[in-house]
Every structure is written in structure tokens, then in C-alpha cells.
Image: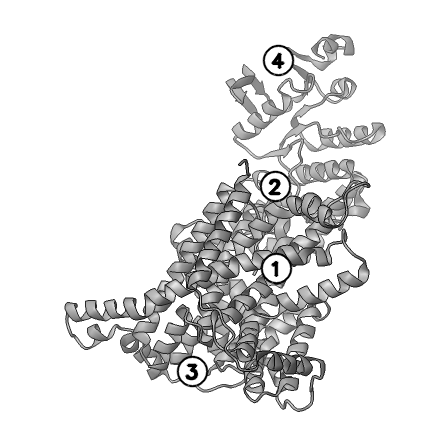
Amino acid sequence: MTALQLYGITASFGGKRVLGPLSLSVEPGERIALVGKSGAGKSTLIRLLYQEALGPVAYVPQELGLVQSLSVFHNVFMGRLNERSSWYNLATLVKPFKRDRDEIEPLLGQLGIGEKQWSPVASLSGGQRQRTAIARGIYSRAPVLLADEPVSALDGPLAHVVMGLLRESFGTSVIALHDVELALRYSDRIVGILDGQVALDEPSERLSETDILPLY
Amino acid sequence: MPSSPTVRVSFLFIAIAFGCLLFADMAITATNPWLDLGRFFMGMVTPDFLSIEGLYTAVLRTVAFAFTGVALGSLSGFLLSLVYRFRAVRLFCAFIRAIHELFWALIFLQFFGFHPLTGVLAIAIPYAGIFAKVYSEILDEADPEPRKLLPFGTGIVSAFFFARVPDCWLQLRTYTSYRLECGLRSSAILGFVGLPTMGFYLESAFSQTHYSEAGALLLVFYVLIATIPIWVRPKLLPVYVLSAPFFLGDGMPIVWGNVTRFFTEDIVPSPIRNSEGFGSLMSWFGDLMVHSALPGIWNTLILTQIALVTTGLIALAAFPLISTHFGGPIRRIFGNVFLVVARSTPEYILAYILLQLWGPSMLPAAVALALHNGGIIGHLIGRQSSGIKLRADAPVGLNRYSYELTPRVYRSFLAFLFYRWEIIMRETAILGILGIATLGFYIDSAIQDIRFDRAMILILITAMLNIGIDALSRFIRRKLALQTMPTC
């Protein structure tokens, strides 16, 4: 059974076709990196995968979709809003329960934003916001991750920490990355997009940076 | 001659106002208007805080009615805002907010009598209609992205309070606390129809020409409004809201027989009540239209148009007083005091004072409406003009006013002015209670004559007129692409 599947999809923006027609299927356990230059259609493809997904999926879009006035803790907690009763959720807005704090605090610690737990997202830097959205995705415990440039605002070592954590947390993932080195290292299948078409689809171990560069 | 649409619309409204002036009854009829005005100002500078027995009670009741009414209105408005997308709800809200607080009070007085419920509902009902509209507009502005990312199966309550409310919490809070200030003004004027708030004491001080007592009451009222940021704190708010209902006073008990009679007999048109047939009903209605409704509508429209243009002139003349681009700090302090006094004094109280001093005509009403509304708009665009960055070699004086600043604030000035058009009309109708022949005069007379059937029809006509002006104002604002935030 495939985890995610798109067949013959197209996407247009303002009357101009930006993606497709293309087909893509993702098997459970696959870790795919989407590569290609900006504007190639990676974001559109990830969004379509999210819209067509049948089961629970953790989605980290480029614009992150955080609630600016809520704290980091509450934004992360939103990853499991569906699992609790409305009363539990409302009470959490006023005062979070200890067991949720015990679960979220170490996760934020691993991502290096533990001390920001109670700051509103609006007061964070770009990289801290990105990690908040990633924490929300991990906290949701969905089996599949769809992420669009999740580490674009993080510097070298931190990007590796976050990518490693994502690999640990999700069995199946499709991650758009513009950093070729990260793509090769944290995926087992590379899908290259050029002008809205799949121009490359190979296991990562058979590829090197020079094979991918023509896409840019 | 080339001109922009905003300029053409402005001239059109000025021309209409001049036309209205030909028909308006503008006069000073008092024998000694300036002497009285002088004595009133002497009263303001020699306030007598000790001789009013009820000063403390007046303040307490005014605050208690404001808090209870606004809290109830805010809660009901919030619930209504959740279903505001339904046309029936929108129409219902437009209708209840088109009827002024004082008219609601006059209605409830007829069957609840001087029970605290009369004052609370008079504020809560129209405020609920306004809150519903503004809350739903604010909630619509919330960032839609977080909602799209919620895990599948999230309940609507959780989704609403996590992904929608927090994003606009600040605006909701700011608007509600701003409305509280409006609520204090509404509460104060309820005293003029006999409820135990400040207006009641002000009216009795004036009628006995105790100007020092009136001055004291007004000064206390300004201090109350000006110090809102100090005594209204988020932490104290629950305390105020929960304790306010216990400080409304006892009033008189409700006679439930009166309530039944009001709805089943009093407001039923008399020809129907007395089974006099259709012909009789038609002549009853015709008489009501010719002798009350049409003259009332005519006078309300005339006064509204004059007051609207005068409001605009005062706002444009007053905004430089507080703008940082003119004058020094001393001029700005005086400008601020003038504008705070103008906008904190309800137009009803201003009109009442001016009528006492100048005698009955449209003039005191027009001046009162223009001072209050001009004060509000002047304050808003003055503050906006201070935010404008001028080049270092910008012209000074009149050239700076007419070439640099006024053109830049003119669009938002017009937006505020047209937004307040409907508010000015609602107030114009209400000022009739003071004896100017607008709709409120005919409504008040019908109630005095215990002809509630006629009063109810006239109140409905007033509401329809307000809804019509509101629609026209929104049409003009949309045509001119003017945007604004709500004011009260």
C-alpha cells in the first residue's frame, strides 16, 4: 500500500501551468527529498500531496501557519487538538496540564528553543519560528511528514540536528530542500523538479552533488 | 474643471447642507444667552463638589449600569457574531443597533418601570448589535493558515479558540474597552429619562440653575473617562463585571401585568384594538404620517445634514491643534484638552446645556452634534497627521496645512465622517426629546400622551431611516474606496 499518491495532477496559477501533469507515489518507509530551484513547483507539489493525503500527515508549510499571539507551547500543543476534548483544550489555553508540559518541554529542549516555551511566537526569530512549526509536526505523532524547506532559516549544525530529529520521528517523509548536501544525506530517494515536471527520480545512494546541479 | 471624486462628493454635501439651512430653524431665543453662558462657565471653574448629596451614588450607578450593560451586550454580541454569516442575524443586529439607547430606555420604562433592568437592557441591546458586527469583522480578519493545518478531527470549539480567537484577541480587547468608554457616556445620559445615573443629577442641577453643581458633575465625569486606563485593568475587570449588578440600586419592582398589557394592548394600533375596521386604521396611519412621521423625518434629515457638514468643518479646523506639525507643546496641551472635553461630553448633554442657555431651536443641537463628533474625528486625524513624516524643507503655516497635511488625511477624514453619518442621524432623532422637532420629539410626545401604538411606529420609522442612511454611507464609502475602523 502506498502512503501518498498523486496521479496525473496539474496545477495552474493565474492561467499559467506551474506543475504537471505528473504522477508520484510514496511508499511507507520512504524518505524523499524534493530538489529543484525556487519556483520549480516544489511547494505546490507538497501542498497537493497534503490535500490528497488520506491518513494523518504532519505538514510544515513554508509560511509555517503559526498563531502569532499564542506561546510556543500552545502552538506545539495544537498538533494534537483532535485527540482531546474541547474542555481539555480550553483549560489548556488558560493553564497547561503538567503531563503535556512534561512531553513538550523536552521536545523543545532538543530543538534548542526550551527557554522560549512561554514566549509568543510573534516575538521569535525566523529560525525559532521554524523550529516551533517542526515541533508541532513531531508532537502530532503522524506517521508521515510533508515539509517545505523546514530548515531554510537554520545555520549549519542546527540544520543537521533538526534533520536528524525529523528522520528519527517520521518513518515516511517528503521534504523539499534547496540544500543539495542535506538532501543527499537525509533521504533515500531524490525527486528533482524542473519546470513543473519530474526531471530526476533516483535512490540517493546512486547520486552525487554533480548529478543534481543541472536542475539548478 | 478637473477635480477628484472625494472633492466632488464634499462639495455636494456642502451644497445640500446650505440648502437645508434655508429650511432650518436656527435662532437664539433666550433673552440673555451670553449671560447664562458666562454663568455656566463660572460654574465650571467654581465647581461645588460638596452640595450634591448624590454625587457618589451618581458615579457608582453610572459605572454599574455601564459595566453591566456593556458586559451583557459584549457577551450576547460575541455569541451573535458566531452566526453573523446568516442574513437573518445580520438584519436583526442592524435593527437593534439602529434604535438609540434612550429609545430602548423609553420603551422599557413603559413596562419595567424604574427597575434596573430598564437601564441595563437599554445599553445591552443596541450594544449587542454593534458588538456582533464588529466582532465578526475582526474574527474574519484572523490569519486563515493555522486553521488549515489543524489535525483532522479537531472540534469546532477547539479550532475556534486556538486558531481564530488568539490571533485577534488584542483587537477584540481594544474594541471592547473602547466600547466601555462609550457605555459610560450612554449610562450617564440614561439619567435624563429618570434612571439614577449622572444625567439625572445634571438635569436637576441645571433646572435649579445650580451651575457650580453642574460643573462639579461634569468635571467628575471627565475625570472618570480620562482615567479609564488607570482604573480599568485587565486583572480588575472580572471584579468590576461581577460586582456591578449589585450596585444598580433597587429601583421599583416590576409589575408583570404591565408587561403583558404593553405587548397585548398598548402597542397595538388603537383602531385594531377597538375593532374599528380597516378604513379607520388607514386614517389613523395617515394622520400619524402627516402630523408626526413626515415632519419628524424632514427635520431629522435637515438637522443631520447641517450637523454632518459642521462636524467636518470643526474636525478639519481642530486637528492642527493636536498635530505635532504645528505649534509647540503648550498649544497642543490646550488642543488636547479641548478635544477631550468635546468628545467625552455626550452630544445629548452638550445639546441639553446649550438649549438651556440659548433657548429652543436647531442651533444648539447642531452645535452640540458638531462639537462632539468634530472632536472625535479631529482627535483621530490629528493623531494620524502626527505620524506623517514631512520633508525637511516642507512649507510652514497655512501652506503646510493645505498642501502637505490635509490632502494626506483627507480620505480617512471622509471615511470617519461618513462612518459617523448614521451615528449623527441616530443622535439627531434622539435630541428631539429635548424639544427640537426631530423624530424623537414626536416619539416623546406620543409617549407623554400614553399613545404607545404611535410611539412604536415612529421608533420603527426612525430605525428604518438609520438603516437606510447606514446603507447609503456604506455605498458612498465603497464608491470612494474609503476604509475606516469603527468609532462610537
Q: Which residue is mark 1?
A: B314
Amino acid type, callout 3: Gly
Q: Residues within 10 Å of mark 4 (few under 14, many from 20)?
A: some
Judging depth in this view, the residue of A139 and B18 nearest the camera is B18
Q: CA distance from mark 3 to mark 2?
A: 50 Å
Q: Is residue A184 above or below residue B215?
A: above
Q: CA distance from mark 4 to mark 3?
A: 76 Å
Whole-percent x, y for residue B280 in the image: 17, 71
Q: Earlier in the sequence, mark 3 or mark 2?
A: 3
Amino acid residing under circle 1: Ile
Q: Nearer the viewer, residue B199 or B235?
A: B199
Tell if the residue under mark 1 belongs to the same chain as the one under mark 2: yes
Q: Which mark is residue B146?
A: 2
Tag nearer the camera, 1 or 2:
1
Q: Of circles 3 and 2, which is in front?
A: 3
Residue topped by disc 4: A195
The chain letter for the residue carrying disc 4 is: A
How far, Cα to Cα, is label 4 from label 1? 61 Å
Same-chain status of marks 3 and 2: yes
The first of marks 1 and 2 along the sequence is: 2
Q: Are marks 1 and 2 in contact (CB under 8 Å)?
A: no
Task: Name which residue lies at 65% across and 57% down.
Answer: B317
Density class for disc 3 (Cα within 10 Å; few <14, some 14-19, many ≥20) is: many
Give the left or right position of residue B191, taking residue A109 as reference: left
Q: Which residue is mark 3?
A: B113
Of discs 3 and 1, which sits in the foreground? 1
Q: Nearer the viewer, mark 4 or mark 1?
A: 1
